[in-house]
Amino acid sequence: MKSILDRSFRYTSSAQTDVRKTFARIRREQQIYQHAQAQADAEARLKVSPIRGARDAPGRCRQPFPGKP
């Protein structure tokens, strides 16, 4: 968002602002963002972590309760 102190800032009076176009632009931007987010989520679901076997698990003991027969 531009600051009013920025030299490229141009004031637009409310009489010259088209609210419908502004909301339509915002809706388009939100749809693009949501579409990109959905694609990123779909790609994340496709990535699979390797399943670690019992031999690979650190600190695993063979007895369910250590110290008891």
Image (cartoon, helix red, strand yellow):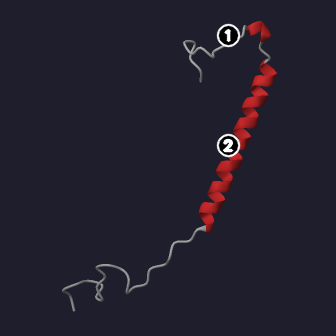
Residue wearing tag 1: 11
Q: Which quarter shows the N terminus?
A: top right
The residue tagged 2 is 33
Q: Does dot 2 land on a helix, a strand or a loop? A: helix
The residue sitting at 51% across, 72% down in the picture is 49
In the drawing, does residue 55 fall left or right of residue 25? left
Q: Amino acid at mark 1?
A: Tyr
Residue at image x 71%, y 48%? 35
Give the mark toward the camera: 1 or 2. Answer: 1
* Mark 1 Cα-neighbour bin, 10 Å: few <14, some 14–19, many ≥20: few
At label 2, the amino acid type is Tyr
In space, the residues marked 1 and 2 are separated at their CA atoms by 27 Å
* Residue positioned 74% across, 9% down in the render: 14
Estimate the x, y position of residue 10 in percent, counting from the top left: 67, 12
Image position of 30 with respect to 57: above or below? above
Q: Quadrant of residue 24?
A: top right
Q: Is residue 49 above or below residue 63?
A: above
- Coordinates of residue 3 in the picture (x, y in percent): 56, 17
Residue at left 28%, top 88%?
A: 63
Q: Give the mark nearer the N terminus: 1 vs 2.
A: 1
Spot the residue most to the bottom. Answer: 69
Placement of the C terminus among the 4 image quadrants: bottom left
